Amino acid sequence: MKKRKIPMRKDLLTNTMQPKKELVRVVVDKDKNISVDPTGKKSGRGAYVSLEPDKIAQAQKNQVLEKSLGIKVSADFYDDLYAYVDHQKARKELFGDK
C-alpha cells in the first residue's frame, strides 16, 4: 500500500514545519484586507499560524503578521483570529483528529 504524502507548511509563529491540517491560513487580498482562511483556498498572500491561542497573543505582541504580510493588522482581527483558534483547539480536543 502506498503511503500518502502529508502536506507541510511553515508555521509563522514557531518557525517550524508542521502538517497543513494543524495550521490555519491568514490571507491578505489585493485590496489589503486581512482574513482567516479556513479552507486554504482564498486568493492572496497567505501565512500559516499554529492553532495555539497563546501563540496568537505572542504574535500580536511581537507584530509577527504585520512584518510577514507587510500590512497593518487591527486588534479586532487578532480578536477574531484568537476566537477562531480557540474554537478549533476546543473542537479538536472534543472530537479528536479527523
Image (cartoon, rainbow, N blue to C red):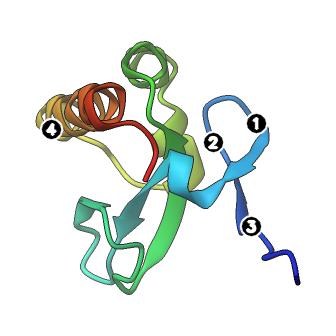
In the picture of the structure, the residue carrying the numbered disc 4 is 80
Give the x, y percent position of residue 89: 33, 29
Query: Split into 4 quadrants, where in the image is the C terminus?
Result: bottom left
Q: Amino acid at mark 1?
A: Asn
Q: Where is residue 84 drawn, in percent x and y?
A: 21, 39
Amino acid identity at mark 4? Asp
Dot 3: element: loop
In primary-sequence order, the first of circles 3 and 1 is 3
Q: At 19% across and 41% down in the image, what residue appears?
A: 77
Measured Cα–Cα span from mark 1 to mark 2: 5 Å
Which residue appears at 41% of the width and 73% of the height? 40
Residue hosting label 2: 12
Mark 4 nearby-residue class (10 Å; few <14, some 14–19, many ≥20): few
Of labels 4 and 1, earlier in sequence is 1
Q: Residue at x 25, y 26 (%)?
A: 90
Pointer 2 with pointer 4, Cβ within 8 A: no
**Could you tell me how far apart the alpha carbons at marks 2 and 4 are, in whole angstroms?**
18 Å
Residue most toward the front? 1
Task: Say which quarter of the image contains residue 39.
Answer: bottom left
Q: Tell me how far mark 3 sits from mark 2, CA to CA.
A: 19 Å
Q: Secondary structure at mark 2?
A: loop
Q: Is the residue under label 2 in contact with that under label 1 (CB below 8 Å)?
A: yes
Residue of label 1:
15
> Residue 95 location, x and y as percent?
29, 37
Q: Secondary structure at mark 4?
A: helix
Sequence-wise first label, 2 or 4 = 2
Q: Which label is found at residue 6?
A: 3
Q: Which one is nearer the viewer's eye here, 8 or 97?
A: 97
> Disc 4 to disc 3, how far (Cα)?
28 Å
Q: Is residue 13 left or right of residue 91?
A: right
